[in-house]
Amino acid sequence: METQSEFFFCSGAATEVLKVGSFQLSGEKVLLLLIPGNPGVVGFYESFMRTLHGLLGTPVWAVSHAGHCAPPDSMDLVEDGAAAARQDVFGLDGQIRHKLAFIQDRVPRGTRLVLVGHSIGCYMILEMMRRSPELEVLKAVLLFPTIERMAQSPQGKVMTPVLCQLRYLAYLPLFLLSLLPQRVAALLVRLLLRGVPALDPCVLRPVLDMFSGDCAVNSMYLGGQEMRMVQERDNITIQKNLDRLIFYYGATDHWCPVSYFQDMRRDFPHGVIRLCERGIRHAFVLDAGQEVAQMVAAWIGGSLTA
């Protein structure tokens, strides 16, 4: 199954879009658009996307976060550094505006969307639906959704000091990592991920890309903003779009613990809010991309033919 990767500037920042299925949408009526977690490197989702397209036959695209990619050598990370800084394109609000700009610039008007979000991508999708209610969204699938109280979650309590106060200490080691020969870096990545027994080989290249250049720095910067800004759940937007939303929480997810799932079920008893019964980790792309894609395809298949 052929895939295509494109690099271009969106909101003035280097952006990668990974496409499975139709590379142009001239005659397509529905697009599955993936908004990734953090880091927002689209290559992590290749197996997930291939499986989704194979089961549904619908084009599946994933758009990276601004600056979360390794662009060609001929391409800078931003078109205008001063403008990027003023607009804070690498921050959380900037990333949301970046996704809306991508849809406006790259998706033909009238295309109906199935939005699939992972982790912070779920927060971005809810914000996109709030800010642009005119978007033709058939369904939005929110996987392991970090949409509230991130800093208060078990993982957030550990990572908030790291991302908000100590992230600058990581910049020098990240820079040194980027200087390593590819073979040595690949060996380090395999050692880092040796605890994942069924590791998807598709994720090795994205991990290497993440450490080559500024991608990891931009990821940490975004993470720091997530800890500060993702606090109250947007109940108004959820209620307004409840019939179009599907939530999937992890049973062992330290970013959005089971208590968050229980609160959601209590507050939205008529919503489609599921709890994982398969032991799938928050970073499902590491070893369960195909499995999660099979579930998503089963949930949304009927909406594509309606």
Image: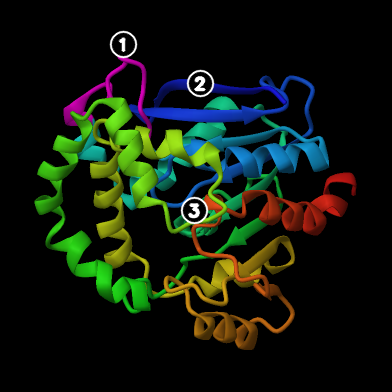
Q: Tell me the SS state at disc 3.
A: helix
- Please give the residue where the numbered disc 3 appears in the rendered image: 121
**Depth check, front residue: 295 or 197:** 197
The boundaries of the magenta stretch are 67-83
Circle 1: element type: loop
Dominant SS type (magenta): loop
Q: Does any portion of residue 68 appear in the rendered image?
A: no
Which mark lies nearer to you, 3 or 1? Answer: 1
Q: Is residue 81 magenta?
A: yes
Q: Residues within 10 Å of mark 2 (few under 14, many from 20)?
A: few
Q: Nearer the viewer, residue 54 or 300?
A: 54
Type of the residue with mark 2 = Glu
Taking 108 as reference, is 122 above or below it? below
Which quadrant of the figure contains the N terminus?
Answer: top right
- Of the numbered discs 3 and 1, the one sitting upstream in the chain is 1
Asked if residue 148 is among those painted magenta in the image, a careful observer would answer no
Horizontal arrangement in the rendering, residue 261 relative to residue 227 (left or right): right
Kindly identify the amino acid type of the residue bearing the numbered disc 3: Gly
Point out which mark residue 74 bears.
1
Kindly identify which residue carries mark 2. Answer: 6
Task: Give the CA separation, mark 2 to mark 3.
Answer: 20 Å
The reply to whether residue 266 is in sight is yes
Identity of the residue drawn at 48% across and 79% down: 257
Q: CA distance from mark 1 to mark 2?
A: 14 Å
Residues under numbered marks 2 and 3 in contact, where contact means CB atoms less than 8 Å apart: no
Left or right side of 35 for 15: left
Q: Which mark is residue 165?
A: none
- Circle 1 packing at 10 Å, graded few (<14), some (14-19), many (20+), is few
